[in-house]
Image (spheres, rainbow, N blue to C red):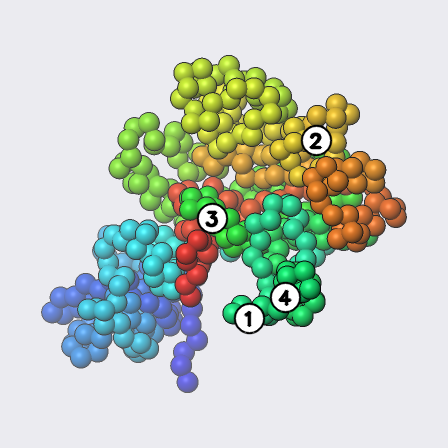
Amino acid sequence: MREKRTKIKHVLSNEPLGESLTVMGWVRTKRASKSVAFIALNDGSSINNLQVVADAEKFGEELLRKITTGASISATGKLVESQGAGQTCELVAEQIEVFGEADPDKYPLQPKKHSLEFLREIAHLRPRTNTFSAVMRVRHALAFAVHQFFNEKEFFYINTPIITASDAEGAGETFHVTNFDLANVPKNDEGGVDYKQDFFEKEANLTVSGQLEGELAAMALSDIYTFGPTFRAENSNTTRHLAEFWMIEPEMAFYDLKDNMDLAEEMLKYLVKYALDNCADDLAFLEKRAADEDKNKPQNERAEMTLTERLRFVLENDFERVSYTEAIEILRNSKPNKKKKFSYVIEGWGADLQSEHERFLVEKHFKKPVILFDYPKDIKAFYMRQNDDEKTVGAMDILFPGIGEIVGGSQREERMDKLSQRMEEMDIPAEEMEWYLDTRRFGAVPHSGFGLGFERMILFVTGMGNIRDVIPFPRTPGNCEF
């Protein structure tokens, strides 16, 4: 029977010198002389490798030849203090078993620098690299922290549908779900698609948000959150957009806009602190990686703060709360706007802010995270609560350095007459939303909520430059591999 495995993370943190133990993992590198081989072994539990020392005479050339970069092995031996540089302890192997070989002429992850573009093409292997194993461990830690935060707040976790008949944003950028043979779609008497013959007997799509269904749950349980995949059929080939991504969407009964902003700020700080407290080794590696990348950029494109400094910047500063109207004045009178340095020049009130404007407010003007609130109703969704000025709605966005908007939310419109009027103005058919309107007919209460794109949060915490590199298998226009 095989010896019980000890994770390399625990070996390196506890360093039980003199003990006999077994480790298993994948070979990162091997250095060999005539008398000894030094094997850097990693099992994914840590960014750090364990050095396994194998006596060439004991194990023989035939076995050691199989131990190449990418091969998987088990090594049993005694942990001793290391005499070499780069590690404090090492395992002197007494037994080695090769589980799986990796032909060095074919294995694509040889020990050299690979571009992120190349690694996206082999997304099934890229978690074996230092960069992506670090990102995935941080992603796991933050997913756990999300659930822990809301559990501590006594929120209930609700699973909202992935297949739905509603388009929460009203934007129409949805992936359709059908059981039809697309070469032979049935038609109705008017010549349109006869959805009565489809699986759900109506038009269906993948969800763009769990918000509306989350509101239903909040009208019974008070405080709920969803955390699941969402989909946008938006033809955006940018570093900040995915067709499939994960959203965290709390909905809270009896919360006004200020309560909503307070909760969102508290949650973001909680997640950042959790990462700093629990992902130190991975963040140190990612910080160095980001600094090395910066060296290849022009001076004006380099980050002003290190990764850790950006995280502490969020943690240690109260978020500045600024109305949209005030922000527009700041931007309109700013040097980049007056000198037409912005790609989208701010002419006046009503403009939809772009990432360059958001980052200016955070990084140049206030020098702290910013919450913008009270946006023009004409650039926001139908469900947002209308303010007394009849021009703005109780919406809020949270802006972070290096990324711009990371959270969007609002107080929801609980007044039946106002909601119905807004839906009519935006051509949202009331008959298809009767289930939603019932929450206003029966026991309506003030309530609020927000959405955090999980990948945007991972992007910020890891310092990665492209959102495709913080999700295991990115879904983007023209890309649905694996």
What amino acid is found at the position of numbered circle 2 in the picture?
A: Val
Give the label, 1 or 3, closer to the camera. Answer: 1
> In the visual, does 94 lie left or right of 474?
left
Q: Secondary structure at mark 2?
A: strand
Q: Which residue is mark 1?
A: 184
Q: Is residue 353 above or below residue 192?
A: above
Where residue 388 sits in the image (x, y, percent)?
77, 25
Q: Is any atom of residue 461 visible in this view?
A: no
Q: Residue at x 27, y 58 (%)?
A: 82
Q: Do the residues under discs 2 and 4 have CB atoms within 8 angstroms?
A: no
For label 3, the crowd category at 10 Å Cα-Cα, with few meaning under 14, some 14 to 19 and many 20 or more, is few
Where residue 326 sits in the image (x, y, percent)?
61, 19
Q: Which residue is mark 4?
A: 187
Q: Which residue is mark 3?
A: 235
Between 21 and 81, the one lying in front of the other is 21
Q: First in sequence: mark 3 or mark 4?
A: 4
Q: Is residue 228 above or below residue 78?
A: above
Q: First in sequence: mark 2 or mark 4?
A: 4
Between 274 and 192, the one lying in front of the other is 192
Q: Secondary structure at mark 4?
A: loop
Q: Secondary structure at mark 3?
A: loop
Question: How many circles with numbers are drawn on the protein?
Answer: 4
What amino acid is found at the position of numbered circle 1 in the picture?
A: Asn
Residue 332 - label:
none
Q: Is any atom of residue 406 visible in this view?
A: yes
Give the label, 3 or 2, closer to the camera. Answer: 3
